[in-house]
Amino acid sequence: MKTKFLKVSQSELTKVRQLYESVMSHACHGLFFREGEVYGEEITKISLQDRLRFFETARNLIKARGWSDEITFAENSAEVHGSIEVCKSEMATCHRMRGIIRNLYEAHLNTKVHCVEVECESTGAPRCLFKVERV
């Protein structure tokens, strides 16, 4: 089957988040995280084809698919600028991105990891910062 892509605007994604939050409160954040893991599966699969360029390939795919304007991977963290999930909020909103990042690090490190967003542009931070720790 040919892979097709869907374009969704940032405002549409924000409205979907608000819809789910109005029905499920913050319980839906776990669903968004799991959704991100699904999106991350294909990005991870493609990135694993060249382990030496794993994070470079992942970075290019994430940017090309519109998930962020920029993403930088480090040993225990990922820094994101311009996440599609950013919207004015009092709390972190990049749950799908967290799922994508977790998926990538688990495949790269070949172990389970915990990923948490410790800074988010939605709250006024200059970037979204995700900390990654081996479990």
Image (spheres, grey):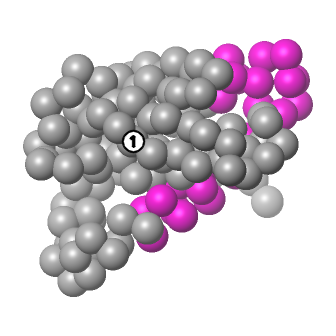
Q: Residue furthest bottom?
A: 23
Taking the image as drawn, is residue 123 in sight?
Answer: yes
* Residue to which mark 1 is pinned: 117
54 falls in the magenta region: yes
Q: Residue at x 20, y 27 (%)?
A: 125
Q: Residue at x 52, y 62 (%)?
A: 35
135 falls in the magenta region: no
Majority secondary structure in the magenta region? helix
Q: Is residue 84 above or below residue 19?
A: above
Amino acid type, label 1: Glu
Q: How far across and down, in percent of the image, does residue 89 sit? A: 13, 48
Quarter assignment of residue 51: top right
User: Is 54 on the left-hand or right-hand side of 64?
Assistant: right
Magenta region: 31-58
Taking the image as drawn, is residue 6 in sight?
Answer: no
User: Is 53 on the left-hand or right-hand side of 13?
Assistant: right
Q: How far across and down, in percent of the image, does residue 87 sit? A: 18, 43
Q: Residue at x 53, y 27 (%)?
A: 77
- Which secondary structure lies at badge 1? strand
Q: Residue furthest front?
A: 135
